Image (cartoon, grey):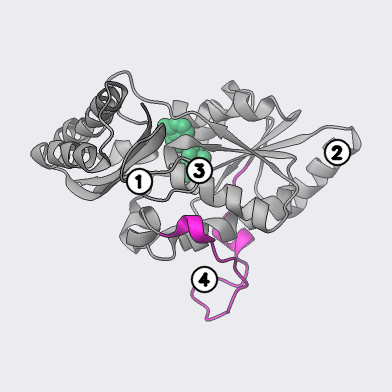
């Protein structure tokens, strides 16, 4: 497996692979890799022959400097895990490789504005976040020019925002969705979990437990979104979490639902201490 830090070297290797007839697959991540990230590799492998794993903690999608500074960075062990997962190349650029003019220099960079799927949910409480995401993902896509790129359903709204990006801007890239991966006790895997104290991790478990309960209630015939949302919020608050949002939305358009006629996506964000956790589950009547 190759580890590359410059755009020039990455482009030259990718051109070589293309000349050899290989389809390129891309796995964008912010590193601190866990089994949820690794599960993305075989998913994109089905649509590609040469898999590039991108590791970049993108400063422009963070709302606070403290969140950016505390984000875990573990390049050495990430590369080992990527090799074991069958990745062909890790691209791990420094920030000045991607943003050569610097981020605090006053230089006005060109950027992409996220579409309507970015409104509400995380977009409402993290202003500018999805603009940062679609801008950096556009940069990734322009540098790698992948045939396929994979995104996890863990970040359900992000997946929809990226699908809208490639659709609206006519990017010839297949976006593949990968299922959310959980710890055995139900906690959704996230790089941020390692920032949790053991008490906050315990509190965080109430998220997946209440989502599973909601799934059971809807499967048993409860159609009222308000009833489900209250049950989830109450459980999270009782566990000591600070709720950011609990919403049930259309699985495709992310429009909030009042009742669950056939399916809906229950999406949750809550703070365990200073750590913001997100999770979601498909509800089916
Ligand atoms: P991140 O490094 O958190 O930006 O995540 C990089 C990619 O991995 C995104 O497409 C995420 O949706 C995906 N991902 C992160 N955690 C999980 C998980 N627990 N299950 C599935 N995909 C995940």
Q: CA distance from mark 1 to mark 4?
A: 39 Å
Comparing labels 3 and 2, the label whose residue is closer to the camera: 3
Indicate left or right for 168 with 198 as reference: right
Q: Quadrant of the N terminus?
A: top right
Can residue 25 be found in the magenta stretch?
no
In which quarter of the view is residue 240 placed? Answer: top left
Q: Which residues are magenta?
A: 91-119
- Image mark for residue 103: 4
- Percent position (x, y) of residue 50? 74, 31
User: Mark 1 or mark 4: which comes first in sequence?
Assistant: 4
Indicate left or right for 194 with 237 as reference: right
| Above or below, comparing residue 177 to residue 102 in the picture | above
Comparing labels 4 and 3, the label whose residue is closer to the camera: 3
Secondary structure beneath label 2: helix
* Numbered label tally: 4
Q: Quadrant of the C terminus?
A: top left
| Above or below, comparing residue 266 to residue 254 in the picture | above
Q: Residue furthest bottom?
A: 106
Evaluate whether residue 93 shows in this view: no
Front-lying residue, 63 or 148? 148
Front-lying residue, 252 or 25? 252
In which quarter of the view is residue 100 placed? Answer: bottom right
Residue at the image point whose x is 18% and y is 32% from the top? 198
Badge 1, how many Cα within 10 Å: few under 14, some, many 20+?
Answer: some
Which residue bears the numbered disc 2? Answer: 18
Evaluate whether residue 133 shows in this view: yes
- Image mark for residue 257: 1
Which residue bears the numbered disc 3? Answer: 252
């Amino acid at each position: 497996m190759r580890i590359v830090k410059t755009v020039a070297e990455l482009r030259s290797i990718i051109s070589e692979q293309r000349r050899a007839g290989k389809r390129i697959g891309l796995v964008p991540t912010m590193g601190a890799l866990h089994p949820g990230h690794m599960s993305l590799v075989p998913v994109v492998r089905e649509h590609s022959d040469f898999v590039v794993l991108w590791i970049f903690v993108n400063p422009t999608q963070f709302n606070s400097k403290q969140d950016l500074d505390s984000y875990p960075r573990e390049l050495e062990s990430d590369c080992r895990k990527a090799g074991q997962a069958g990745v062909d190349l890790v691209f791990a650029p420094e920030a000045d490789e991607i943003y050569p003019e610097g981020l605090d220099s006053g230089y006005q960079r060109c950027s992409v504005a996220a579409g309507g799927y970015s409104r509400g949910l995380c977009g409402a409480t993290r202003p500018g976040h999805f603009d940062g995401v679609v801008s950096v993902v556009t940069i990734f896509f322009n540098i790698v020019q992948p045939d396929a790129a994979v995104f996890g359903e863990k970040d359900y709204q992000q997946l929809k925002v990226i699908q809208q990006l490639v659709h609206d801007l006519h990017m010839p890239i297949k976006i593949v969705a990968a299922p959310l991966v959980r710890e055995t006790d139900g906690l959704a895997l996230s790089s941020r979990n390692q920032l949790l104290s053991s008490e906050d991790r315990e509190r965080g478990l109430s998220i997946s437990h209440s989502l599973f309960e909601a799934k059971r209630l809807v499967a048993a015939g409860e159609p009222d979104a308000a009833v489900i949302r209250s049950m989830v919020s109450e459980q999270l608050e009782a566990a000591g979490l600070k709720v950011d949002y609990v919403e049930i939305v259309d699985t495709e358009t992310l429009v909030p639902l009042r009742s669950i006629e056939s399916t809906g996506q229950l999406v949750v964000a809550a703070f365990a201490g200073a750590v913001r956790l997100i999770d979601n589950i498909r509800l089916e009547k």
